[in-house]
Image (cartoon, rainbow, N blue to C red):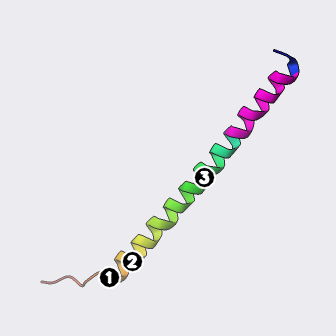
Amino acid sequence: MSEQEKANIHSAYQMAAEMTYLVAVGLSKAKEKSEARKMHRDRKNRKPFSN
C-alpha cells in the first residue's frame, strides 16, 4: 500500500471519528433539552399535596 493510500485511509478514519463525536454531542444536547422540557412540563402540571 502506498503512502498516499495510507494517508487517505488515516484521513477517512479521522473524519469518521470527528463526525461520530459531533453526532454524539448533538444527541446528548437534544436529550438534555428533552429532559429539561419534561421536568418543566411535570412541574407545571403538578397538583398540590392532598391531606
Residue of label 3: 25
Q: Residue at x 54, y 55 (%)?
A: 28
Position of residue 3 measured from the top left corner of the image (x, y, whole percent)? 87, 19
Q: Residue at x 36, y 78 (%)?
A: 43
Residue of label 1: 45
Q: Work out whether mark 1 precedes mark 3 in sequence or the reverse, and give the earlier one.
A: 3
Q: Which dot marks residue 41? A: 2
Q: Answer with the quarter of the image where residue 19 lies.
A: top right
Residue type at tag 2: Arg
Q: Nearer the viewer, residue 31 or 47?
A: 31
Eyeballing the image, is 51 above or below 16?
below
Residue type at tag 1: Asn
Q: Quadrant of the N terminus?
A: top right
Position of residue 6 measured from the top left corner of the image (x, y, whole percent)? 80, 22
- C-beta proximity under 8 Å, tags 1 and 2: yes
Estimate how packed mark 1 is, as few (under 14), some (14 to 19) or many (20 or more) residues with alpha carbons within 10 Å.
few
Inspect the magenta stretch and tell me whether residue 3 lies in it. no
Q: Answer with the quarter of the image where residue 48 lies.
A: bottom left
